[in-house]
Image (tube, helix red, strand yellow):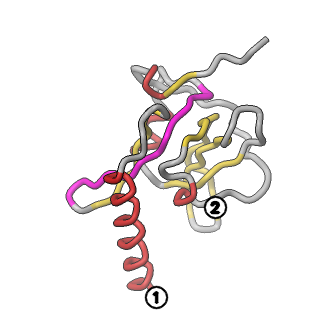
């Protein structure tokens, strides 16, 4: 029997947590996931880490592949996966958006093309992130 799948555009949103166990192995940075299609398979919120509480978005690159995850403190992403209408797995792309000069992340439909504006927003996010990290040293 084939597993039912969804695209992010199919939702009028809401969320229930898939199993809360964390995938094994190393997790990529969210930077490696931005602007690439993924299958979001679940999440875990308020996970205790050595750097305080954080959230985990579980995903796989292709259905049937091993599940992995990335850490995020993005309120937009976590609020979205917590909505009651969300069902896992769903196909999506995470894109960078700017709100008043602040970078944020949003789930978008995996059917959306990655535009030059999306690439420029990602590059601006990386530039601001590097600048912030230099200031913290």
Which SS class for mark 2? Answer: strand
**Residue 137 numbered tag:** 1
Residue 97 is one of the magenta-drawn residues: yes
**Residue 68 numbered tag:** none
Query: What range of the chain is rendered magenta?
Result: 88-100
Q: Nearer the viewer, residue 32 or 21?
A: 32
Q: Nearer the viewer, residue 107 or 77?
A: 107
Examine the image and state in which quarter residue 66 appears: top right
Q: Which residue is mark 2?
A: 49
In the depicted structure, whether residue 35 falls above or below residue 82? below
Query: Horizontal and vertical percent for residue 99?
Result: 24, 53
Residue 75 visible to the viewer:
no
Could you tell me how far apart the alpha carbons at marks 2 and 1 are, in whole angstroms? 21 Å
Residue 25 visible to the viewer:
yes
In the depicted structure, whether residue 40 falls above or below residue 71? above
Q: Residue at x 63, y 56 (%)?
A: 48
Q: Residue at x 38, y 85 (%)?
A: 135
Q: Residue at x 79, y 51 (%)?
A: 24
Looking at marks 2 and 1 on the same chain, the residue that comes earlier in the sequence is marked by 2
Which SS class for mark 1? Answer: loop
Residue 44 is one of the magenta-drawn residues: no
Q: Residue at x 47, y 20 (%)?
A: 85
Examine the image and state in which quarter residue 107 appears: top left
Q: What main secondary structure does the magenta stretch of the protein show?
A: strand
Query: Horizontal and vertical percent for residue 16?
Result: 56, 26
Q: Residues within 10 Å of mark 1 (few under 14, many from 20)?
A: few
Q: Nearer the viewer, residue 51 or 94?
A: 94
Query: Horizontal and vertical percent for residue 19?
Result: 70, 32
């Amino acid at each position: 029997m084939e597993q039912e799948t969804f695209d992010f555009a199919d939702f009028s949103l809401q969320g229930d947590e898939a199993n809360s166990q964390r995938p094994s192995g190393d997790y990529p940075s969210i930077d490696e996931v931005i602007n690439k299609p993924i299958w979001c398979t679940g999440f875990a919120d308020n996970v205790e880490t050595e750097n305080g509480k954080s959230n985990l978005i579980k995903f796989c690159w292709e259905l049937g592949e091993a599940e992995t995850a990335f850490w995020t403190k993005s309120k937009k992403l976590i609020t979205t996966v917590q909505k009651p209408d969300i069902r896992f797995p769903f196909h999506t792309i995470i894109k960078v958006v700017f709100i008043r000069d602040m970078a944020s992340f949003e789930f978008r439909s995996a059917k959306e093309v990655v535009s030059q504006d999306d690439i420029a927003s990602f590059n601006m996010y990386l530039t601001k992130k590097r600048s912030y990290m230099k200031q913290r040293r």
